[in-house]
Amino acid sequence: MENVVSEKRTYREKMNELILEKGGKNIKRFFALDSRVYEAGALTVKNKELMGLVASTVLRCNDCIFYHLDQCHKNDVTDDELFEALSIALIVGGSITIPHLRFAMDMWEKLKT
Amino acid sequence: MENVVSEKRTYREKMNELILEKGGKNIKRFFALDSRVYEAGALTVKNKELMGLVASTVLRCNDCIFYHLDQCHKNDVTDDELFEALSIALIVGGSITIPHLRFAMDMWEKLKT
Amino acid sequence: MENVVSEKRTYREKMNELILEKGGKNIKRFFALDSRVYEAGALTVKNKELMGLVASTVLRCNDCIFYHLDQCHKNDVTDDELFEALSIALIVGGSITIPHLRFAMDMWEKLKT
Amino acid sequence: MENVVSEKRTYREKMNELILEKGGKNIKRFFALDSRVYEAGALTVKNKELMGLVASTVLRCNDCIFYHLDQCHKNDVTDDELFEALSIALIVGGSITIPHLRFAMDMWEKLKT
Amino acid sequence: MENVVSEKRTYREKMNELILEKGGKNIKRFFALDSRVYEAGALTVKNKELMGLVASTVLRCNDCIFYHLDQCHKNDVTDDELFEALSIALIVGGSITIPHLRFAMDMWEKLKT
Amino acid sequence: MENVVSEKRTYREKMNELILEKGGKNIKRFFALDSRVYEAGALTVKNKELMGLVASTVLRCNDCIFYHLDQCHKNDVTDDELFEALSIALIVGGSITIPHLRFAMDMWEKLKT
């Protein structure tokens, strides 16, 4: 079970390193910026990660959903908070997001064990 | 062959149950509503499922395509009806939908055997 | 009121002519193909236009919604048929499609007067 | 100036009423559900509206952006909170969302006057 | 005629300034990065702007299409080059992009006069 | 390693054949048109394939990305050209495209070995 989680983390890191090594300056700058917007500010990290999760769900990207779920888990998001955020994503994005809810459900259970 | 079909059905059901159990009232209400819109009314179930298929194809969601193909198959959609609906999806959605046509073709053959 | 309808039709035709005149062979071929997929076959024109409408709504394109509404109107689609198709689009595409439902509602009333 | 704001609110309400009157039960149920997911729960209304705003921005729907900005304004979202949420939307959704940032900026200024 | 062109340029600049003034560091960094990726390198500015145009067309954003058309015009893109790029966008993105082809056609004629 | 590449090519060809055999005239015409738009004209095949790649990346379709990478490789696209095109896609499409950059990176390395 846990294997899926660690495999996803490992592939992500390995490929990111390769991209940062070979992709040029602009991609590197984008990656730096991509970390900064989730840092604590007027909004908490937790709420920002939930926003990242909602955005990833309505745009229907499982890898992005996994990443933000992982961050949500590290930032002590509760089940209720998670499902309220996912309910917003479901209503905004419609039934086409349901397969991603299933994926999120599956990964969340694995992250918690 | 058939295994892919039954695996998809089983994973879908198992995860839906978990979501309905843990996801809260609003998600549950959405799921109920999601069944109701495909019920027979002024339009037949067959045509509604084909509409669901077209929507899933232009939005490029394989799990949704599989689900509606499965329903189309149960509602005696013919090959001609299927490919006319998919032709509309292809023209509206463009070549970016072609990988989903390949998936639909593959699954349709499996559903028919 | 009707002006909106005729303005939309006129701009569409004028620009299509310009595109067909200047855009080259491949665009011309695509436009021809775009008409063919809605012709009567195993599925009726009415159901095909409703499929075009559902696809346009989940992809959220008002000009495309207007065009298919216009065709639906010419093909005697009833209010019940229209709203059942739009309900599918709403559930599949979520609340992000609601502004397009408002537009569709507005245009449908104008097409009927 | 303010006219744009009140015109948008009025058109929205008028068309929603027409849809609720004529669109049938399933659309009515969806609209009810659409209000419920933004109610206070484990997450605050303010954070939920910001999530709605982020989702609307990455999906690039100006009418939805306006609606959530209006709700954010009523729920005392600060400039800093707003721009942190919009920064997430911009990074997730890319430069294609910039025209919607411009619209959001424009409307936010009008809502504050 | 030309007014549409200059109005679009002016609104864009005015709002961009406001965003850069009030939107915070991360948005400012993104805007800087957004200019850099179109600079001459292994690929010419002309081809990069055409890539930006194709991306904007398949993602169906008129303001972005206008911006890249304006840049294409300044970089001496010919009609043939433009329509070949737009043909790719049309085939990849499907008939849902046609209203954006009409807009591009309309703006291109205005930029050339 | 190479297996992934040849498996993808084989599945694609096999399914395309099945679609062309069973999908009807309109799908066949679309497939023909889909080849034509990438042929040399005012723009080179190389630049057209890079445009196809950018479009596929912002629309986030791995199968399409793979196909255009394969064509780019056959048309002697250099690493620098590739990453400049992908940088445009990343900036236009945002962080939601990053998983597809990882996929592109991975496949590009495999195509080059």
Image: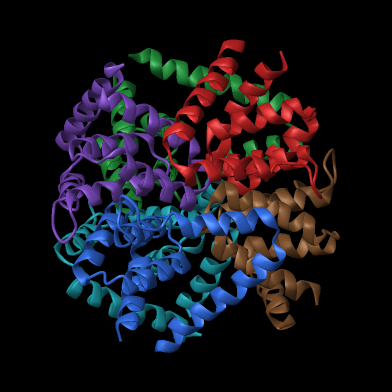
Chain colours: A purple, B red, C brown, D blue, E cyan, F green
Q: Is residue D34 above or below residue D62?
A: above
Q: Is residue A32 left or right of residue E106?
A: left
Q: How many marks?
A: 0
- Compared to residue A2, the image places residue E70 above or below, namely below
Residue C28 picture quarter: bottom right
- The answer, for residue F47, to whether it is visible in the render is no
Residue B37 versus residue E58: which sits nearer the camera? B37
Of E20 and B15, nearer the camera is B15
Q: Quadrant of residue E34?
A: bottom left
Q: Residue at x 64, y 60 (%)?
A: C64
Against C108, residue B111 (above or below) is: above
Q: Position of residue F101 (x, y in %)?
A: 31, 37
Q: Is residue B104 left or right of residue C81?
A: left
Q: Say if residue E36 shows up in the picture.
A: yes
Q: Up-down: is E84 above or below B90?
A: below
Q: Which sits in the foreground, C48 or E48?
A: C48
Nearer to us in this view, B67 or F33: B67
User: Residue shown at 47%/84% (left/top)?
Assistant: D6
Q: Position of residue E67 (x, y in %)?
A: 38, 68
In the rendered image, residue B94, in percent from the top left (x then y), is placed at: 58, 45
Residue at the image position 62 percent from the left and 11 percent from the top:
B2
**Position in image of residue F113 (x %, y %):** 29, 18
Q: Residue at x 59, y 59 (%)?
A: E98
